[in-house]
Image (cartoon, grey):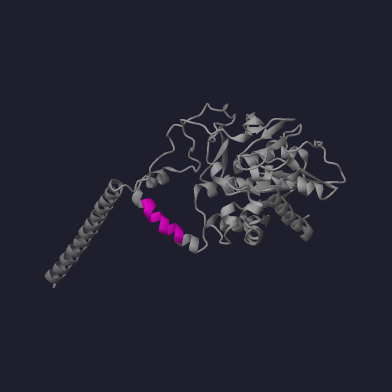
Amino acid sequence: MLVAIDASSRDAKTKVDLMKKNIILLLVTLAVMLGIAEFVLRVIGLEDVKLRDLPRIGWVNVPENVWVEHHPVLGWYAQKNKAAILESAHFPQVIVHTNSSGFRGSRDYSLRKPADVIRIAALGDSFVFGFGVRDEDAFPALLESSERRREVMNLGVPGYGIDQICLSYREIAKNYQPDIVLVGIFPDDFWRATRAFADSGHAKPYFSVGNFGQLTLRNVPVPPPFTLNRGQFPPVIEQNKVQKLLNKSVLYRLARKPFMRLLRNMRLIDPDTSEEWILGRTILSELIQDIRKDQSLPVLVLIPPKEWAQSGRKTSLEKSILRFVEREGVDLINLHPVFVDAVARDGLETYYIKNDWHWTPKGHAFAARAIEDYFGRGGN
């Protein structure tokens, strides 16, 4: 009987040892296969081409150079009390005026807000600024002229990203104690925030996002123009050592795509998973918090590019913005649907300058009416 038990024990031990060997063999085989797959993927060229560190060998001459100057925090900002001629082959010559604070237009505003007015600060890029139209035809000026007891300060600056828009509130707009802060959002504003300098040669500030969502401001004081020519797109999403190691693997990056798609379909993450949006939404969230701390009302204005205005389909970025405003509980004036209807009815070039694709005076007037509709519905 004892012999039979010993034989049974030996058989069980043999099976366990065999199982261990099979598991080890399986793991080794899997590791070898993954290594071969990684090698093959790199050989056939699926490795990302890294262009971030290539030096810049030329600069784009932008029209706004005639009225902007270097700014140590914002990168560039309008010269004060300036009158400049904006020339382009795509629209008639336009005279651009800035006031004593660098805002678009000739009117000055006191730091202390008058008691009997509603003061609005309009932040954004060239669409808010009114690139290609006269001072009085930009939608902030139209909003101001439509209501006697309303002040609308145009702090739009061509070429700004969402990072500079945020900083322009902290550095300038908040000092004027606005009741409402209109934040114009154009899709390009997000990738602009991933740059350390613009194609025009102007250096700029940028933020990076840490592992716990904290923002770190970098490149401030901003170097003078044309002093940076490498690293235009620095790392903006900070990663721990494990993430850095995984991201070196082509196989991991390929496997990550369907996994992220699954998470999007399950609504566990935003539709847009790009670095631009991850950084942009973090900046936007902090800007909204800053505005609310100052007891002002933040209102986002989504500005559609011409491609959006020609299609009613929502992009992943628009879907992400819609989810963002729901999470943040912030008002959004989405101009995409109304511009789609208007363009379908009247034609694209009624509202967008041909071959330039900023808004025409009619485009600004249409945007102003849509924003007025928001005010009329109780937005203000």
Q: Position of residue 111 (x, y in %)?
A: 80, 36
In the picture, the quarter occupied by the N terminus is: bottom left
Which span of residues is magenta-colored? 252-261
Placement of 324 over or under 7, stated as above or below = above
356 on left or right of 27: right
Is residue 310 one of those drawn in magenta? no
Q: Main secondary structure of the magenta part?
A: helix
Where is residue 61, by image quadrant?
top right
The residue lying furthest to the bottom in this view is 1
In the picture, the quarter occupied by the C terminus is: bottom right
1 on left or right of 205: left
The residue lying furthest to the left in this view is 3
Q: Which residue is painted at 54% across and 57% down in the image? A: 315
Q: Position of residue 266 (x, y in %)?
A: 50, 64
Placement of 125 over or under 312, stated as above or below = above
90 on left or right of 51: right
Between 140 and 136, the one lying in front of the other is 136
Q: Position of residue 322 (x, y in %)?
A: 61, 58
Where is residue 21, by image quadrant?
bottom left
130 on left or right of 267: right
Q: Position of residue 332 (x, y in %)?
A: 67, 55
Where is residue 294, by image quadrant?
top right
Is residue 257 one of those drawn in magenta? yes
Between 339 and 72, the one lying in front of the other is 339
Placement of 189 over or under 370, stated as above or below = above
- Residue 292 visible: no
- Residue 266 visible: yes
Q: Count every numbered label the image shows and give the total.
A: 0
Q: Which residue is painted at 58% across and 30% down in the image? A: 222
